Image (cartoon, rainbow, N blue to C red):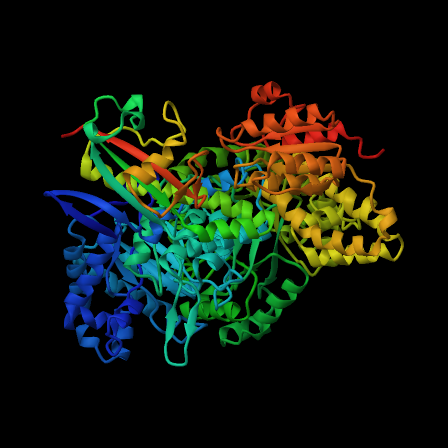
Amino acid sequence: MFFIEITGGEIFIKIYIPETYEIMPQKKIYLLRAGFNGTKFQINDKLKEEINKIYKLGLELAQPKAICDTYKIETIPTELIPKSFQGVNSITFFVSTLGYEIDNYISNANTLSSMLMDAWASEAIEAFNESIDKKLRKDFGKGTRRFSPGYSDIDVRKNWDIVSNLLKTEIVVVNKETGIITPRKSTVCMIGWYDE
Amino acid sequence: MMNRKDFAEILNKKILILDGGYGTEFIKRGYKEIPAEILNIRYPEVVYNLQSEYVKSGADILLTNTFSANRKKLKELNYEEAFEKVNVKAVEIAKQASKGKALVFGDLSSLGEYPKPMGLLEMDEAIDEYYQQAKVLFESGVDGFIVETMTDIKELKAAIYGIRKVTEDLPLIAHMTFEENGRSVTGTSVEIFANVFNDLDVDVLGINCTLGPEELLKVFERLSLSTNKFLSVEPNAGKPVFDGKHLEYKMTPEIFGMFVEDYLDLGVNIIGGCCGTSPEHIKVIRNMVKRRPKKIVKEIPIMYSSRTILNKFHPFTVIGERINPAGNKKFQNEIEEFNFENVIKRANSQKSVKAQAIDVNLGIEKILNEEHFKQIIIELDKHSSLPISFDIQNIGFLETALKEYPGRPIINSSKLSKKDLDRKLELIKKYGGLLIVLALEKEILESAEERLQLVLRKWPYIESKGITKDRIIVDPLVLSLAANNDPNITLETVKLLSQNGFNTTMGLSNLSFGLPNRNYINAAFLSRAKGKGLTSAILNPEDEFLMNTLNGNLLLDKNIVIPSKVEKQDELTEKILQGEEGEVKRIIENQLKEKSPLEVSQDVLGKAMEKIGDLYAQGNIYLPELLLAAETVKPIFDYLNNLIPESQNDKKAKVVLATVEGDIHDIGKNIVAAVLRSANFKIVDLGKDVETSTIINAVQKEKPNILGLSAMMTTTVGKIEEVVNELKKLSIKVKVIAGGASMNRKLAETFGCDAYAKDASEGLKICKSWVNLNS
């Protein structure tokens, strides 16, 4: 569901709590990430059970949430704007997370389970971002590709600036020195918009 | 209206979503006192709202709310007079709710009473009931039909015959419902369902109800392997939970949705939900379908079946000849008087000597009527007979018998004259099955070549009727030796037919009529014919000599595997890979009776794990399989270690592992630890976010052969260089291997590491090359 804030007649999304299915990754991709590269062999029943168990558990443990805000280009510090965003009029920044429970599980389970959960959650956050991405494009029209600090010309440590100075949220914590975000299954993203 | 060709085209391109539950949803919405179908006329808005929600959730096909709206069921509910109205209204509501965005399929299901022998209903009555309902639905403008939740294969056949009597132009989906063991409650397996319906005029085969998506998956896989028709599935929302008052289905849409992709992998074309599923479930299913249908073409062997028995035609089919009262007056009289005791006895005795099918030839057709044929099929079905080969001359009687038959029959036989062929081909098209054709049009041809040419000449005509070669068996004609016929002509014909890709059969006993020692002659001839490629014969399976001769031939052709006592290679490795901890423990306990704990740990369990490590390193198993193996043996290693004196237990190569300071995520490093442990390394794991000084202290204390360092972020990767520099400064000799998301070969070199590994598999290879584990 959306919590919509209205400021000066402009509508933007503030907090976004998705429907559970929006964070459901394709099993194929989850398995690929877990190391089942290709379909060379049959997966044995015990592992199939484990794979499904983790998927179910992931859905139970995940507390997905996103904070989202859109800024006119002139109000954004230039060091936060990727070169590839040239020509955009505004940028939506969002931070998405699956919460701490998944981290706790990964830290405390056996290697197989934690590895599977890690793979599942990586793809779940991706599915979540994909869902946010789709919704934003519906509202804002033509935009850039989704971008995260740490790629191309934006340093990963800029995560801190975006979370603390722009979005001003505490749903995640960023280490200013390393750019590492906790909970682990969280991302900071931005999409630039060309339309007025 | 949707024609079948268009429908097939859509299914080739796109996975369609069916709607979800009706009955359970109506109950949830407060309508449990009124039959679901009656809502169509009493509260049409309730049906309309639910169907609108299904369309909104993304359903491509809406089913009319007519599941139990056949006349028979409505009569039981005292609503017989509303029969037509309920069905007409159902189509009207669904069409309105679809708003042109979804197809509307007429929904039919069980009549509440099975056809004989499982129930008391006559097959013709059952067909007529379905015909009546299908007619109303068709005239109201449905786009297609679905018959679902069928537990009796004969009733499903009745439904298909009834619908196809109304129209041959609309798509038709046929579903059965199965228990977890893959059999319906009336004993039909999934494979038999497919075997029978592969021949029939339906577009899609599927399964619904009874099981949730998880349990249904294995059953569905069996269906998928048994048919090349389009596939559909509608699982329940898990297993029903009974709270003492009502049945509830509690599986959430998301958990249900988790299995959608597994069905896509098996080639499903249409997917929806059954009991307990709601518009929310359909919404999630829609969301999980993100690809085009997977086309899997299966090689399906030629098979034939009864209700409960399915047999492969190859390498050789023995059709028992003993239900034939020719020359046996007493037997003839019994049949005439509807006393089928002897028929059943002969069917059972042939089954017990391993015949695969039974030929039913009553011979005395002039004094029998349709009822005899109907009853005999019902009786045999009741006694779960072998599949039947129908040796019936009168075309009307033959059709009666075929209509009554639940399985996939063999029809014995047709001449190659146009008239006979037309009638028989029409029958197998309508009722399914294999057809034996005689290499004969009017007169018997003299030479093998002529017989072959006749078959080849007629073949295009058979093919033009849509019949493939795997449904035809050719009889080269066996004539009596006593009448001076040359048996070699038959043998030669078998050879020529086989060379031209035809399956063959023959009435073996014809050969030796009137001769002494018939079984010797028959056996010798069968041997020769088998050598020429014969694939089947109608013979006396109770002739032990003959059957042994046949089995000897099959053995020579390598078609029978001699049971051997070769032990399965390395049971221990197998059990570890399957994650069967209890079994592994059992094997280890047995080993402990003869070996010391140290020997078992190193030479048995250690070796098995080493083998598994090698399998992984060579890319023959996946990483999760290796981890499962590691988890499986961990408690057993612990158990063995407790039995080994400390002094004996320290001979492994040692690796210290750490994720460097700043990195708080160490799943990769943990995987490396598990992989190395499984290859018999001793691991000292310092954890994550470990300061350089802590790593150095640990190396000084543990004196490992190898130090493994992991860094994930570009901002922490420099810590690896810090550790290496510190080691150099202190002149500590240890091989350093680095890995992690932000590391690469070039960086590792720059930092002065001895090696870089991109993943655990590479890490294992490098560590093994550095350490001679056997020293």
> With respect to residue A29, does B132 lie above or below?
below
Quarter of the rendering occupied by the C terminus of chain B: top right
Instruction: Tell me which corner region of the image, top left, top right, bottom left or bottom right, holds residue B370.
Output: bottom left
Q: Is residue B267 left or right of residue A13?
A: right
Picture coordinates of residue B180 (x, y %)? 51, 62
Residue B89 visible somewhere in the drawing: yes
Relative image position of residue B283 (x, y in whole percent): 30, 53
Left or right: residue B424 versus residue B333 is left
Write the residue at 57% across / 19% down: B746
Is B674 located above or below residue B747 in the figure?
below
**Closer to the camera in the image, A106 or B621:** A106
**In the orientation shown, which residue stands out farthest toward the left?**
A9
Is residue B570 found left or right of B202 in the rendered image? Answer: right
Front residue of this view, candidates B624 and B159: B624
**Residue B103 visible here:** no
Residue plotted at (22% across, 53% down):
B55
* Quarter assignment of residue B145: bottom left
Query: Number of numbered discs present?
Result: 0
- Where is residue B61? Give x, y as percent: 26, 52
Question: In the rendering, at what x and y percent does residue A27 appear?
Answer: 45, 45
Q: Residue at x 33, y 40 (%)?
A: A164
Q: Nearer the viewer, residue B103 or B664?
A: B664
